[in-house]
Amino acid sequence: QDIDQNPLLWQAQGISNDDIEEAGCVADQQQESSKLSPRKKPSILPVLIIPGFMSSGLEVKRSELHKHWEGKRIWLNLVSLGLDGFFNKTKKGSQVFDDDDNEDEDEDEDHGDVDVDGDGDEEEDRKQATCNIIEEDQHLAIHKSMFLKHMSLALDNMISEHPDVEVRAMEGLNGVDYLTPGTLTNHVSYVFGPVIDALKKAGYKEGVNLDAMPYDWRLPPSELERRDGYFSGIMRKVEELYETNGGIPVVLVCHSLGCKVGYYFLNF
């Protein structure tokens, strides 16, 4: 401003009139350009979730051992562990008695006289209840064995899977919201579900400014990148969120083991 008001200072600084006029024209053009195309930035920062290992969902991509499991979540899934009866009580399951129902039932139990269906044949009911318990135990053992075959890695390298199985990380928010999604199970298996719901109520939109990067927590970081391209995937996702939201910083929300994974990514 002083130079503009006192031409003598121009000469002292070695600045000619042509230089001043050219600089003024460039400044005017930049100012006009900013007025014509103002850069609007979103009011909320985009969020990318990196979960802990419990909430990093894994699904069965291929299975020659249990075709019915293909395309379904295996980690963590109570049904694949054979614990579906925890939420779905059926007559096939073992009989559950409430000790506080009445004293008569307590007395019958003490004397070994239990008539489940009221037909007077306590011995037959007892045999049926025992068979149900044995069948449940067998059902649970089979599912646990099948679960381990899908989830375990080879002992010689702790990288290779069973040759008939391919398990991979789920994609997006579906892999981090609930362990066992469902109307009856959401309230007891939530992980990031309530957080995601709160962010959506605040204006976040899935795939626009809110996303997640589950990972196969069974593998070391180097193998995560070699086999799945995981850290390259995070980089692409961050760049996508950054560009989609007007070039503002992306917030990494990391939890538990996800903090270690996020730290590895920042040094990737």
Image (cartoon, grey):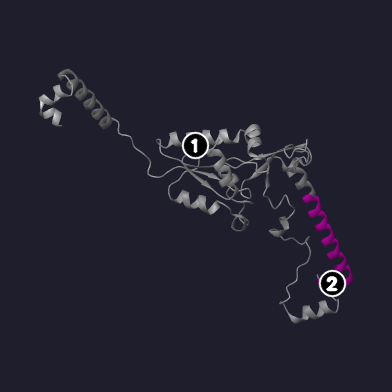
Main structural element of the magenta stretch: helix, strand or loop?
Answer: helix
Where is residue 37 drawn, in percent x and y? 30, 31
On the question of residue 121 being in view, the answer is: no
Where is residue 26 drawn, in percent x and y? 23, 23
Look at mark 1 in the image and give the residue it sits on.
Answer: 238
Binning the other alpha carbons within 10 Å of mark 1 as few (below 14), some (14 to 19) or many (20 upward) gives: many
Look at mark 2 in the image and give the residue it sits on.
Answer: 119
- 54 lies left or right of 209: right
- Tell me the distance, in whole angstroms, between the alpha carbons under discs 2 and 1: 67 Å
Which residue corresponds to the image point at 33% horizontal and 34% vertical from the top-left? 39
Q: Nearer the viewer, residue 159 or 202?
A: 159
Binning the other alpha carbons within 10 Å of mark 2 as few (below 14), some (14 to 19) or many (20 upward) gives: few
Question: Eyeballing the image, is 236 above or below 81?
Answer: above
- Identify the image quadrant of the N terminus: top left
Is residue 118 within the magenta segment? yes
Q: Which residue type carries mark 1?
A: Val
Is residue 114 within the magenta segment? no
Q: Which residues are magenta?
A: 117-144
Sequence-earlier tag: 2 or 1: 2
Where is residue 188 drawn, in percent x and y? 62, 58
Q: Which residue type carries mark 2?
A: Asp
User: Which element carries disc 1, helix, strand or loop?
Assistant: helix
